[in-house]
Image: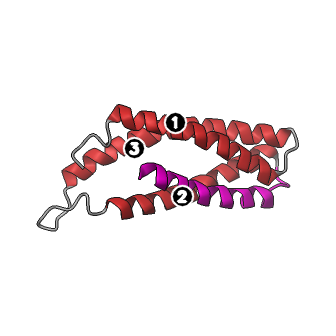
Amino acid sequence: MLNKNILIAFAASITISAIVAHVLSDQADYLNTTYTLFVDYVIYFSTFSGLYYLDNRKKYLLKSGQTDKSKLKHDLIKIITSLGIAEIVYTIIRWFFQYYFLTVNYDAYLASITSQVISTIIYLVVINLSVKMTRLYKDEN
């Protein structure tokens, strides 16, 4: 389910990021890259957070209807750790590739899409390794 949410969030962010890159194509390459990356993050995390919440909202409910704060805190630490490592890798790779593609005269939207696809593939590998290392889904749920 984590990968499904990541891929849906990716689809939303790649579309909006390409539009923003195209609209900002008259900006300097480093500004276009930076602004596009910022928009990418806003769209991605908004979408991912909403989908993750919808998929897991019942997981943290006790029989009394209260939230199991201990379990929620424990899982959030694992998620943030897993995402954090992958996000650092993603940010560096995404920024570098989009900037590179812009400097070799790719269209802005194409530079955005290409760099995001490459970065997301690497991101998925890193996040899946991180999830295994943190044993995020090792619990009984």
Residue labelled with disc 1: 125
Q: Residue at x 32, y 41 (%)?
A: 136
Q: Residue at x 76, y 50 (%)?
A: 32
Residue 60 position by quadrant: bottom left
Residue labelled with disc 3: 80
Question: In the visual, does 27 lie left or right of 92?
Answer: right
65 w.r.t. 85: above or below = below
Circle 3: residue type: Ile
Q: What stretch is highlighted in magenta?
A: 1-27
Between 126 and 100, the one lying in front of the other is 126
Residue 120 position by quadrant: top right
What is the distance, in whole Å, between disc 3 and disc 1 at their CAs?
A: 16 Å
Circle 1: residue type: Val
Q: Where is residue 31 in the image (x, y as percent from the top left)?
A: 75, 48
Q: What element carries label 2?
A: helix
Dot 2, how many residues are within 10 Å of its Cα: few (below 14), some (14-19), or many (20+)?
Answer: some
